[in-house]
Image (cartoon, rainbow, N blue to C red):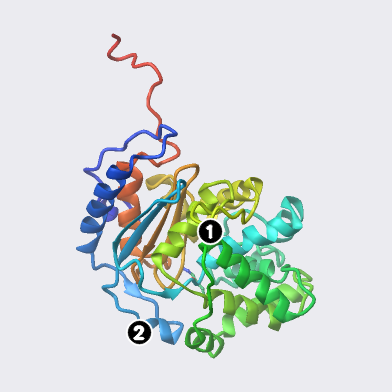
Amino acid sequence: MRESELDVEDVPQAAATGEVPETARIDDLLAAAHDRARVHTEGTVADYIPILAEADPEAFGVCVADVDGGLHEVGQTRRTFSIQSISKAFVYALVCGQLGHQEVFDTVGVNNTGLPFNSVIAVELNDGHPMNPMVNAGAIATTALVPGATATERWEFIRAGLSRFAGRDLTIDDEVYRSEMATNGRNTAIAELLASYGRIRSDPDEAVDIYTRQCAVSIDARDLAVMGATLADGGVNPVTGVRVVSATVCRDTLAVLAASGLYERSGEWLFEIGLPGKSGVSGGLVTVAPGKVGIGAYAPRLDSAGNSVRGQIATAYLSRALGLNIFASAPHTNQENPG
Ligand code: DON
Protein backbone atom coordinates (compact mmCIF):
# COMPACT_ATOMS: atom_id res chain seq x y z
CA MET A 1 0.00 0.00 0.00
CA ARG A 2 1.08 3.59 -0.65
CA GLU A 3 1.74 6.16 2.08
CA SER A 4 -1.61 7.87 1.39
CA GLU A 5 -3.48 4.54 1.61
CA LEU A 6 -1.66 3.76 4.85
CA ASP A 7 -2.96 7.06 6.26
CA VAL A 8 0.39 8.05 7.78
CA GLU A 9 1.32 11.13 5.74
CA ASP A 10 0.99 13.33 8.84
CA VAL A 11 2.87 10.99 11.20
CA PRO A 12 6.51 12.12 11.68
CA GLN A 13 9.07 9.33 11.37
CA ALA A 14 10.87 8.94 14.69
CA ALA A 15 14.47 7.76 14.24
CA ALA A 16 15.30 4.20 15.26
CA THR A 17 17.59 4.70 18.26
CA GLY A 18 18.20 1.07 19.18
CA GLU A 19 16.27 1.55 22.43
CA VAL A 20 13.05 -0.33 23.18
CA PRO A 21 10.25 2.30 23.31
CA GLU A 22 8.89 3.17 26.78
CA THR A 23 5.87 1.18 27.96
CA ALA A 24 3.63 4.26 28.39
CA ARG A 25 4.41 5.41 24.86
CA ILE A 26 3.63 1.99 23.44
CA ASP A 27 0.22 1.96 25.17
CA ASP A 28 -0.73 5.46 23.98
CA LEU A 29 0.50 5.02 20.44
CA LEU A 30 -1.08 1.58 20.13
CA ALA A 31 -4.47 3.08 21.00
CA ALA A 32 -3.87 5.85 18.43
CA ALA A 33 -2.85 3.30 15.77
CA HIS A 34 -6.02 1.30 16.38
CA ASP A 35 -8.23 4.43 16.21
CA ARG A 36 -6.65 5.50 12.97
CA ALA A 37 -6.94 2.11 11.24
CA ARG A 38 -10.44 1.28 12.54
CA VAL A 39 -12.20 3.77 10.27
CA HIS A 40 -10.76 2.11 7.15
CA THR A 41 -13.13 -0.33 5.46
CA GLU A 42 -11.19 -0.84 2.22
CA GLY A 43 -10.35 -4.36 1.09
CA THR A 44 -12.21 -7.65 0.98
CA VAL A 45 -12.29 -10.78 3.09
CA ALA A 46 -10.69 -13.81 1.36
CA ASP A 47 -13.17 -16.36 0.03
CA TYR A 48 -11.13 -18.75 -2.13
CA ILE A 49 -11.02 -21.00 0.93
CA PRO A 50 -14.78 -21.16 1.66
CA ILE A 51 -14.62 -21.01 5.46
CA LEU A 52 -12.55 -17.81 5.42
CA ALA A 53 -15.48 -15.92 3.86
CA GLU A 54 -17.33 -16.32 7.17
CA ALA A 55 -14.88 -14.06 9.04
CA ASP A 56 -16.27 -10.90 10.66
CA PRO A 57 -14.94 -8.09 8.41
CA GLU A 58 -15.00 -5.66 11.37
CA ALA A 59 -12.88 -7.81 13.68
CA PHE A 60 -9.74 -5.87 14.59
CA GLY A 61 -7.10 -6.30 17.25
CA VAL A 62 -3.47 -5.27 17.62
CA CYS A 63 -0.94 -6.46 20.20
CA VAL A 64 2.63 -5.34 20.79
CA ALA A 65 4.90 -7.75 22.70
CA ASP A 66 8.20 -6.28 23.81
CA VAL A 67 11.42 -8.19 24.36
CA ASP A 68 10.99 -7.80 28.14
CA GLY A 69 7.83 -9.91 27.88
CA GLY A 70 5.41 -6.98 28.29
CA LEU A 71 2.15 -7.24 26.33
CA HIS A 72 0.17 -4.21 25.10
CA GLU A 73 -3.23 -4.94 23.58
CA VAL A 74 -6.03 -3.01 21.93
CA GLY A 75 -9.25 -4.32 20.35
CA GLN A 76 -10.03 -7.97 19.67
CA THR A 77 -6.65 -9.47 20.42
CA ARG A 78 -8.18 -12.72 21.72
CA ARG A 79 -10.37 -13.40 18.65
CA THR A 80 -9.02 -16.61 17.07
CA PHE A 81 -8.29 -17.11 13.37
CA SER A 82 -6.20 -19.52 11.29
CA ILE A 83 -2.54 -18.59 10.98
CA GLN A 84 -2.43 -19.36 7.21
CA SER A 85 0.69 -18.07 5.44
CA ILE A 86 2.19 -16.63 8.60
CA SER A 87 3.04 -20.23 9.53
CA LYS A 88 5.53 -20.16 6.63
CA ALA A 89 7.85 -17.80 8.52
CA PHE A 90 7.95 -19.86 11.69
CA VAL A 91 8.14 -23.29 10.02
CA TYR A 92 11.01 -21.91 7.94
CA ALA A 93 12.80 -20.89 11.14
CA LEU A 94 12.20 -24.33 12.71
CA VAL A 95 13.50 -26.15 9.61
CA CYS A 96 16.55 -23.87 9.33
CA GLY A 97 17.25 -24.67 12.98
CA GLN A 98 17.38 -28.37 12.07
CA LEU A 99 19.04 -28.37 8.65
CA GLY A 100 21.16 -25.23 8.76
CA HIS A 101 21.46 -22.09 6.72
CA GLN A 102 23.07 -23.50 3.56
CA GLU A 103 20.90 -26.54 2.86
CA VAL A 104 17.67 -24.58 3.14
CA PHE A 105 19.14 -21.73 1.10
CA ASP A 106 20.04 -24.13 -1.71
CA THR A 107 16.79 -26.08 -1.66
CA VAL A 108 14.25 -23.31 -1.14
CA GLY A 109 16.00 -20.01 -2.02
CA VAL A 110 15.63 -16.48 -0.70
CA ASN A 111 14.66 -14.29 -3.67
CA ASN A 112 11.29 -12.67 -4.29
CA THR A 113 9.30 -14.07 -7.22
CA GLY A 114 7.49 -10.77 -7.90
CA LEU A 115 4.39 -12.90 -8.44
CA PRO A 116 1.36 -13.82 -6.32
CA PHE A 117 1.76 -16.27 -3.43
CA ASN A 118 0.09 -19.19 -5.21
CA SER A 119 1.67 -18.67 -8.63
CA VAL A 120 2.34 -21.79 -10.68
CA ILE A 121 4.05 -19.75 -13.40
CA ALA A 122 6.71 -18.65 -10.88
CA VAL A 123 7.72 -22.31 -10.47
CA GLU A 124 7.84 -22.88 -14.23
CA LEU A 125 9.80 -19.69 -14.89
CA ASN A 126 12.52 -20.80 -12.47
CA ASP A 127 13.11 -24.41 -13.61
CA GLY A 128 11.03 -25.72 -10.77
CA HIS A 129 12.95 -23.79 -8.11
CA PRO A 130 10.48 -22.52 -5.49
CA MET A 131 12.56 -19.28 -5.07
CA ASN A 132 11.60 -18.40 -1.49
CA PRO A 133 9.91 -20.00 1.50
CA MET A 134 7.11 -17.42 1.81
CA VAL A 135 5.22 -18.31 -1.38
CA ASN A 136 3.17 -21.51 -1.41
CA ALA A 137 5.71 -23.43 -3.55
CA GLY A 138 8.59 -22.58 -1.20
CA ALA A 139 6.53 -23.22 1.90
CA ILE A 140 5.48 -26.67 0.65
CA ALA A 141 9.14 -27.42 -0.21
CA THR A 142 10.15 -26.26 3.30
CA THR A 143 7.49 -28.39 4.97
CA ALA A 144 8.74 -31.36 2.91
CA LEU A 145 12.13 -30.92 4.69
CA VAL A 146 10.66 -31.25 8.20
CA PRO A 147 12.44 -34.08 10.10
CA GLY A 148 10.58 -37.10 11.50
CA ALA A 149 10.13 -40.84 10.83
CA THR A 150 6.39 -40.63 10.09
CA ALA A 151 3.88 -38.03 8.90
CA THR A 152 2.53 -37.86 12.46
CA GLU A 153 5.99 -37.09 13.83
CA ARG A 154 6.61 -34.47 11.15
CA TRP A 155 3.30 -32.77 11.89
CA GLU A 156 4.02 -32.82 15.62
CA PHE A 157 7.43 -31.20 15.00
CA ILE A 158 5.58 -28.27 13.41
CA ARG A 159 2.73 -28.04 15.92
CA ALA A 160 5.07 -28.20 18.91
CA GLY A 161 7.49 -25.71 17.34
CA LEU A 162 4.76 -23.17 16.55
CA SER A 163 3.51 -23.64 20.13
CA ARG A 164 6.96 -22.81 21.53
CA PHE A 165 6.98 -19.61 19.47
CA ALA A 166 3.55 -18.66 20.86
CA GLY A 167 4.29 -19.81 24.40
CA ARG A 168 1.14 -21.92 24.63
CA ASP A 169 -0.16 -25.19 23.18
CA LEU A 170 -1.59 -24.48 19.73
CA THR A 171 -4.10 -26.72 17.94
CA ILE A 172 -5.67 -27.02 14.50
CA ASP A 173 -9.04 -25.56 13.57
CA ASP A 174 -10.47 -28.70 11.94
CA GLU A 175 -13.15 -26.84 10.01
CA VAL A 176 -10.52 -24.65 8.35
CA TYR A 177 -8.32 -27.66 7.58
CA ARG A 178 -11.20 -29.54 5.95
CA SER A 179 -12.41 -26.50 4.02
CA GLU A 180 -8.96 -25.92 2.54
CA MET A 181 -8.31 -29.62 1.82
CA ALA A 182 -11.56 -29.74 -0.14
CA THR A 183 -10.48 -26.83 -2.38
CA ASN A 184 -6.73 -27.42 -2.53
CA GLY A 185 -6.26 -28.14 -6.26
CA ARG A 186 -3.74 -25.37 -6.73
CA ASN A 187 -1.43 -26.39 -3.89
CA THR A 188 -1.66 -30.02 -4.97
CA ALA A 189 -0.65 -28.98 -8.50
CA ILE A 190 2.26 -26.90 -7.15
CA ALA A 191 3.53 -29.85 -5.07
CA GLU A 192 3.29 -32.25 -8.03
CA LEU A 193 5.13 -29.74 -10.20
CA LEU A 194 7.91 -29.37 -7.62
CA ALA A 195 8.18 -33.16 -7.37
CA SER A 196 8.36 -33.46 -11.17
CA TYR A 197 11.42 -31.18 -11.09
CA GLY A 198 12.94 -33.24 -8.25
CA ARG A 199 12.61 -30.28 -5.88
CA ILE A 200 10.80 -32.22 -3.18
CA ARG A 201 11.89 -35.69 -2.28
CA SER A 202 9.10 -36.66 0.11
CA ASP A 203 5.55 -37.61 -0.94
CA PRO A 204 3.97 -34.45 -2.47
CA ASP A 205 0.50 -35.33 -1.13
CA GLU A 206 1.87 -35.62 2.38
CA ALA A 207 3.71 -32.31 2.05
CA VAL A 208 0.46 -30.60 1.00
CA ASP A 209 -1.48 -32.25 3.81
CA ILE A 210 1.01 -31.11 6.47
CA TYR A 211 1.31 -27.64 4.90
CA THR A 212 -2.50 -27.33 4.99
CA ARG A 213 -2.55 -28.40 8.64
CA GLN A 214 0.08 -25.82 9.58
CA CYS A 215 -2.02 -23.11 7.82
CA ALA A 216 -5.10 -24.16 9.86
CA VAL A 217 -3.45 -23.69 13.27
CA SER A 218 -5.65 -21.45 15.39
CA ILE A 219 -4.07 -18.33 16.93
CA ASP A 220 -4.95 -14.79 18.01
CA ALA A 221 -3.24 -11.40 17.62
CA ARG A 222 -1.57 -11.75 21.01
CA ASP A 223 -0.01 -15.08 19.91
CA LEU A 224 1.27 -13.41 16.76
CA ALA A 225 2.88 -10.61 18.77
CA VAL A 226 4.65 -13.11 21.06
CA MET A 227 5.77 -15.19 18.07
CA GLY A 228 7.13 -12.03 16.46
CA ALA A 229 8.78 -10.93 19.69
CA THR A 230 10.58 -14.30 19.83
CA LEU A 231 12.14 -13.50 16.44
CA ALA A 232 12.91 -9.98 17.76
CA ASP A 233 14.59 -11.46 20.85
CA GLY A 234 17.30 -13.61 19.25
CA GLY A 235 15.08 -16.70 19.30
CA VAL A 236 14.11 -16.68 23.00
CA ASN A 237 10.39 -16.36 23.74
CA PRO A 238 10.34 -13.28 26.00
CA VAL A 239 7.20 -14.41 27.85
CA THR A 240 8.22 -18.01 28.65
CA GLY A 241 12.00 -17.55 28.59
CA VAL A 242 12.33 -20.68 26.39
CA ARG A 243 14.84 -20.66 23.54
CA VAL A 244 12.95 -21.67 20.38
CA VAL A 245 15.58 -21.11 17.66
CA SER A 246 19.09 -19.67 17.52
CA ALA A 247 19.89 -16.00 16.97
CA THR A 248 21.38 -16.94 13.57
CA VAL A 249 18.11 -18.56 12.52
CA CYS A 250 16.24 -15.38 13.57
CA ARG A 251 18.57 -13.25 11.49
CA ASP A 252 18.11 -15.46 8.42
CA THR A 253 14.34 -15.65 8.83
CA LEU A 254 13.97 -11.88 9.21
CA ALA A 255 16.07 -11.28 6.09
CA VAL A 256 13.75 -13.57 4.11
CA LEU A 257 10.69 -11.80 5.52
CA ALA A 258 12.09 -8.42 4.52
CA ALA A 259 12.55 -9.66 0.95
CA SER A 260 9.29 -11.54 0.51
CA GLY A 261 7.02 -11.50 3.58
CA LEU A 262 4.33 -9.48 1.80
CA TYR A 263 4.69 -11.23 -1.56
CA GLU A 264 4.87 -8.95 -4.59
CA ARG A 265 4.17 -6.00 -2.27
CA SER A 266 7.29 -6.61 -0.18
CA GLY A 267 9.16 -3.65 -1.71
CA GLU A 268 6.29 -1.26 -0.98
CA TRP A 269 6.02 -2.60 2.55
CA LEU A 270 9.73 -2.19 3.24
CA PHE A 271 9.67 1.30 1.70
CA GLU A 272 6.80 2.47 3.91
CA ILE A 273 7.17 0.43 7.11
CA GLY A 274 10.85 -0.56 7.06
CA LEU A 275 10.50 -3.80 9.04
CA PRO A 276 10.34 -7.53 8.29
CA GLY A 277 6.76 -8.80 8.35
CA LYS A 278 4.53 -11.65 7.25
CA SER A 279 0.89 -11.62 6.28
CA GLY A 280 -1.74 -14.34 6.05
CA VAL A 281 -4.88 -14.58 3.98
CA SER A 282 -7.19 -14.85 7.01
CA GLY A 283 -6.13 -11.29 8.00
CA GLY A 284 -3.21 -11.83 10.36
CA LEU A 285 -0.04 -9.79 10.11
CA VAL A 286 3.12 -10.16 12.18
CA THR A 287 5.86 -7.55 12.16
CA VAL A 288 9.25 -7.71 13.87
CA ALA A 289 11.39 -4.82 15.10
CA PRO A 290 14.66 -6.66 15.89
CA GLY A 291 15.78 -6.24 19.48
CA LYS A 292 12.59 -4.34 20.34
CA VAL A 293 9.08 -5.71 19.74
CA GLY A 294 6.82 -8.05 17.83
CA ILE A 295 3.53 -6.64 16.53
CA GLY A 296 0.55 -8.93 15.90
CA ALA A 297 -2.50 -7.62 14.07
CA TYR A 298 -5.75 -9.21 12.98
CA ALA A 299 -8.26 -7.63 10.58
CA PRO A 300 -9.70 -9.80 7.80
CA ARG A 301 -10.17 -7.27 4.99
CA LEU A 302 -7.26 -7.69 2.55
CA ASP A 303 -5.62 -5.72 -0.21
CA SER A 304 -5.40 -7.29 -3.67
CA ALA A 305 -2.15 -9.11 -2.79
CA GLY A 306 -3.72 -10.78 0.27
CA ASN A 307 -2.41 -8.51 3.06
CA SER A 308 -4.59 -7.14 5.91
CA VAL A 309 -5.48 -3.50 5.20
CA ARG A 310 -6.11 -2.36 8.78
CA GLY A 311 -3.17 -4.43 9.95
CA GLN A 312 -0.87 -2.59 7.56
CA ILE A 313 -2.27 0.83 8.52
CA ALA A 314 -1.89 0.23 12.28
CA THR A 315 1.62 -1.19 11.82
CA ALA A 316 2.71 1.71 9.61
CA TYR A 317 1.59 4.13 12.34
CA LEU A 318 3.48 2.23 15.04
CA SER A 319 6.61 1.94 12.92
CA ARG A 320 6.74 5.71 12.44
CA ALA A 321 5.58 6.86 15.85
CA LEU A 322 7.66 4.40 17.89
CA GLY A 323 10.78 4.83 15.74
CA LEU A 324 10.89 1.18 14.67
CA ASN A 325 11.76 1.55 10.95
CA ILE A 326 15.24 -0.02 10.69
CA PHE A 327 16.25 2.47 7.98
CA ALA A 328 15.32 5.63 9.93
CA SER A 329 18.39 7.26 11.46
CA ALA A 330 19.14 10.82 12.62
CA PRO A 331 22.57 12.53 12.55
CA HIS A 332 24.71 11.39 15.49
CA THR A 333 25.84 15.01 15.95
CA ASN A 334 23.31 17.69 15.11
CA GLN A 335 25.32 19.62 12.48
CA GLU A 336 22.43 21.92 11.60
CA ASN A 337 22.03 23.29 15.13
CA PRO A 338 25.51 23.06 16.73
CA GLY A 339 25.50 23.84 20.42
O1 DON B 1 -2.15 -22.11 0.74
C1 DON B 1 -2.94 -21.18 0.82
O2 DON B 1 -3.40 -20.62 -0.16
C2 DON B 1 -3.34 -20.72 2.21
N1 DON B 1 -3.34 -21.82 3.13
C3 DON B 1 -2.40 -19.67 2.73
C4 DON B 1 -2.27 -18.48 1.82
C5 DON B 1 -1.99 -17.21 2.51
O3 DON B 1 -2.20 -17.03 3.69
C6 DON B 1 -1.54 -16.11 1.65
N2 DON B 1 -1.53 -14.90 2.38
N3 DON B 1 -1.74 -13.81 2.16
Is the CB atom of the residue marked by disc 1 within 8 angstroms of ligand 1's nearest atom?
no
Mark seen at residue 114: 1
Residue found farthest to the front: 240
Closer to us: 214 or 267: 214
Please name the residue shown 64% across and 82% down the image.
Answer: 209
Please name the residue shown 47% across and 58% down the image.
Answer: 226
At label 1, the amino acid type is: Gly
Closer to us: 153 or 327: 153
Quarter of the image with the N terminus in it: bottom left
Closer to us: 1 or 144: 144
Q: Is residue 314 left or right of residue 231?
A: left
At label 2, the amino acid type is: Glu
Q: Is residue 75 visible?
A: yes
Can you give x and y, in whole percent of width and height, for residue 140 in the image? 65, 71
Please name the residue shown 72% across and 76% down the image.
Answer: 153
Please name the residue shown 65% across and 65% down the image.
Answer: 125
Instruction: Tell me how far mark 1 sits from mark 2, CA to CA.
Output: 30 Å
Q: Nearer the viewer, mark 1 or mark 2?
A: 2
The image shows a total of numbered marks equal to 2
Can you give x and y, in whole percent of width and height, for residue 60 in the image? 30, 67
Q: Is residue 286 left or right of residue 60?
A: right
Can you give x and y, in whole percent of width and height, for residue 232 in the image? 51, 48
Q: Can you identify the residue that label 2 sits on?
A: 54
Q: Is residue 131 visible?
A: no
